Image (cartoon, helix red, strand yellow):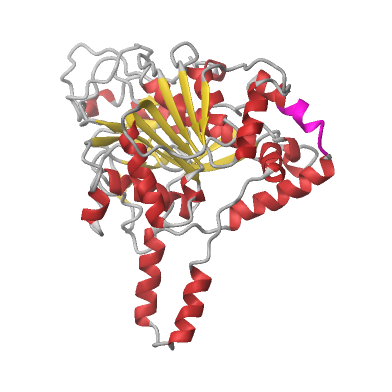
Amino acid sequence: GKIPAETLTMNYFHIKRVPNPQWTYRYLLSRKTSGKPLIVNAKEDNVIREGQTVKQSFSLPPVALPEALSSAVKLVMKNYSAKLMKEDASVLCKYLLTRQPPTTFMVKNRKSMQSDAQPQSIEEQNESDQGKSKYSPMRYGQKEAIAYMASRLNPSYAVTYRVLNELALRCPDYKPETLLDFGSGLGTTVWAANELWKNSIYEYQCIDISEDMEKNAKLLRQGGDKNGKPLIKNVYFKQYLPLSNEVCYDVVVSAYSLSELPTIGLRKSTIRTLWEKTKDFLVLIEPGDIHGFLIIDEARNMLLNSDTSDQEADMEGTEDVGHVFAPCPHDAPCPLVQREWPVPCYFAQRAELAYTQKKTFIERKGFFIEKFSYIILRKGERTEKQVFSRLLQPSKKRTRHVLCSLCCPSGEVKTHIFTKRKSGCLYRPTRKSKWGDLIFVPDSEHAVEEEK
């Protein structure tokens, strides 16, 4: 049967027990399913064995703030005008949605377009370069910090919790002890990690250049009372990221922070520093648009040493071997970027309505959908062969068949067709699959390659 969504655990679909485990996949297609809680055997790719897991789901219901954090936000909001907060939040959200942070792909594409265009004078070139390279990061003062709290705190927490929850579900025995949060802001990463690893983490190191953000984050940890006791202990703040690598952390997180950096060089040096400071996992989260995705892909290529452009400069300081833990099931270059124009790889998470989203047209749904791009990198070589494929889009349900766009372990993006007659044991779990799930697809299953 179904596992309740409130348990926040993976949903498994398993294959029925058969007398001979070496029977081929086609024979098992006509058999029904049953729940045998056993793990997939990665050595048999083309044979579905007894009790094999064919789907892993990490989708969550609409994520709400912890009760302590929600009550603290309400206390802080009482000290400010609701009308002014909504106006400031609207301006902030529009700026965050419309800005275009510089990326390596955009710079290369602009140079190629300029080479094909007609030659310009020196004055025209200077004017065009100044207009295209103009990018100013957001400076968060007290007004911007309150506007962010009233509009972006809920979706930011929901996405961070969704990503860290996948790490916790796939590695249930992993208990981190230290965590570094780059661009901590209001401390959403600290609250999310505290919900998942409350009994194991004994040190949180937060890095943020804004003093007002730091003050409001500390106020929320005290329950909205300046004289209150901290609800989460052992949280330390620094304004700048230390360059020395003497102190490292088990998990390093950067959520919605790399896009705040004004230049490509500064962002690359920051990524190298974050990779050197982690002992195990590096988690990067950015908005689910083309710019956020290109920033994630830029960090992925640089740390995996697969970026052919400026390879010597990018590889400097990244000698540690690593692999992609999520969402990609492979370490090859992203196939979505190899196309003539890249297609963003992003996912979606439902979040509880923020303070300024209430009493609006969004309130009819009861939740807000936040789109995001992310990557989890782990140090060390890949020890087990990856046999699951990632569902890149919501499955398209048709009459007696399902279309699934999957990122496969081979490094290709393929559209698999699961029919009720030919894919009996895989049809039900794939039809009920959700965006971002991991699905086991044998090599014999029919697939149609995506257009490049």
359 horizontally vs 65: left or right = right
**Vertical placement of 282 versus 176: above or below?**
below
184 horizontally vs 56: left or right = right
Asked whether residue 217 appears in the rendered view, the answer is yes
Q: Residue at x 48, y 84 (%)?
A: 124
Residue 367: quarter of image: top right
**Vertical placement of 367 versus 12: above or below?**
below
Extent of the magenta region: 73-80
Dominant secondary structure, magenta: helix
Q: Residue at x 71, y 46 (%)?
A: 89
**Vertical placement of 409 versus 127: above or below?**
above
- The x and y percentages for residue 290 are 47, 54
- The x and y percentages for residue 265 are 37, 55
Residue 392: quarter of image: top left
- The x and y percentages for residue 97 are 60, 53
Q: Residue 369 versus residue 201: which sits nearer the camera?
A: 201
Q: Residue at x 61, y 50 (%)?
A: 139
Q: Quadrant of the C terminus?
A: bottom left
Question: Magenta stretch containing residue 392, yes or no?
Answer: no
Asked whether residue 325 appears in the rendered view, the answer is no
Question: Magenta stretch containing residue 75, yes or no?
Answer: yes
- The x and y percentages for residue 58 are 45, 27
52 horizontally vs 385: left or right = right
Q: Residue 334 versus residue 226: which sits nearer the camera?
A: 226
**Vertical placement of 251 versus 83: above or below?**
above
